[in-house]
Image (cartoon, coloured by chain):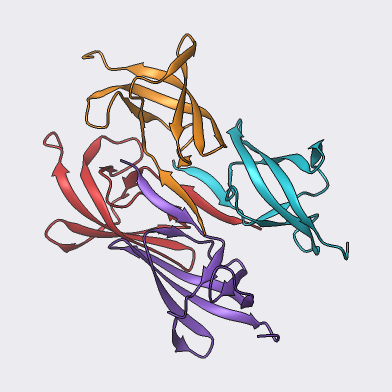
Chain colours: A purple, B orange, C cyan, D red
Amino acid sequence: MGMPLELNTLIVTKGNEKRVEENVFVLVKQGYRLYPIEIPLDVRKTLNSQSSGTALIKKVIWENETTTITYRLIALNSTN
Amino acid sequence: MGMPLELNTLIVTKGNEKRVEENVFVLVKQGYRLYPIEIPLDVRKTLNSQSSGTALIKKVIWENETTTITYRLIALNSTN
Amino acid sequence: MGMPLELNTLIVTKGNEKRVEENVFVLVKQGYRLYPIEIPLDVRKTLNSQSSGTALIKKVIWENETTTITYRLIALNSTN
Amino acid sequence: MGMPLELNTLIVTKGNEKRVEENVFVLVKQGYRLYPIEIPLDVRKTLNSQSSGTALIKKVIWENETTTITYRLIALNSTN
């Protein structure tokens, strides 16, 4: 009917991110997800883990029931 | 995790609309749905039925896993 | 043309919230804003102030170019 | 503050589409726009022109304040 999407306010990597540049990572997630772009977001390894840093999403691609985000880490949590 | 929502571009009533004024109806749908507000949308009784008219959504409420829309019919399809 | 909306991942009160119950507040914002519902969000007095707590949005209303949210504070920052 | 986006329920080409395959076109629009993917949408040359056909969006890219959509025409309006 409509288009299912999921509004996300965190980047949860589950360790699946691929580094493409010094502080830039690409992450593929299942389904269509709506992330704010160019807004500081917490990055976590799992939903319930501590924040591992803060990132800005620079690019979002929706295709074939997947969402691919490219994000730049702008701060790391020193406690991690 | 995230918030599931459904992007809708049609009003599918399934006959559940309640008339509240001459051309104004309230419809409750399950789940959180994102509808464009104040944009002309097709109104249909079922997803695959002919358009029964065109409406503007005037109000959207999200609460308790439901979406309640109030819409004003602005045109009726004469073939219906 | 389309419907302008703003994706928000924080509750920025600017001191405009109205208490309606012990930990429940109502806040009216200009424009149509998309907030995640039932997801823990930071509450701040201004965009750049420290977090004053964490809340769950329980209800969102879009009408007349405004967004009205009802949120329940679930944690207060003790440093504030 | 938040992320401005525009919810779109039509594809308005303004003649800027580029054909990349028989019935597949790429169109770049300013700003971040939320389009339903894999849902039949009207295609129009201008907002107020007649529908020139129906398309399915297959891919959406958000980057650098632009939205790039790839869509497949699935029906043409014979009156055009």
Residue nearer the viewer, D26 or B1: B1
Q: Is residue D34 visible?
A: no
Q: Return the residue found at the far top.
A: B22
Horizontal side of residue C74 vs D66, given as left or right:
right
Q: Which residue ends up furthest to the front in the rendered image?
A: A48
Labels in figure, total: 0
Rendered location of residue A40, percent (x, y): 62, 69
Percent position (x, y) of residue D47?
36, 39
Q: Nearer the viewer, residue C38 or C36?
A: C38
- Would residue A56 be seen by someone viewing this image from the given angle? yes
Image position of C73 (left or right of B75): right
Is residue A55 placed above or below D9 in the rendered structure?
Answer: below
Name the image quarter holding the C terminus of chain D.
top left
Q: Quadrant of the N terminus of chain D?
A: bottom right
On the image, the x and y values in percent for residue D56 come to 24, 50
Q: Quadrant of residue B33?
A: top left
Q: Residue at x 21, y 14 (%)?
A: B79
- The quadrant holding residue B56 is top left
Please report the residue visible at 31 percent of the width from the left and 50 percent of the height from the top.
D13
Q: From the viewer's perspective, is D73 left or right of A19?
A: left
Identify the residue at image location x=36%, y=60%.
A31
Q: Furthest-bottom residue in view?
A: A22
Residue C28 position in % (x across, y down)? 71, 39
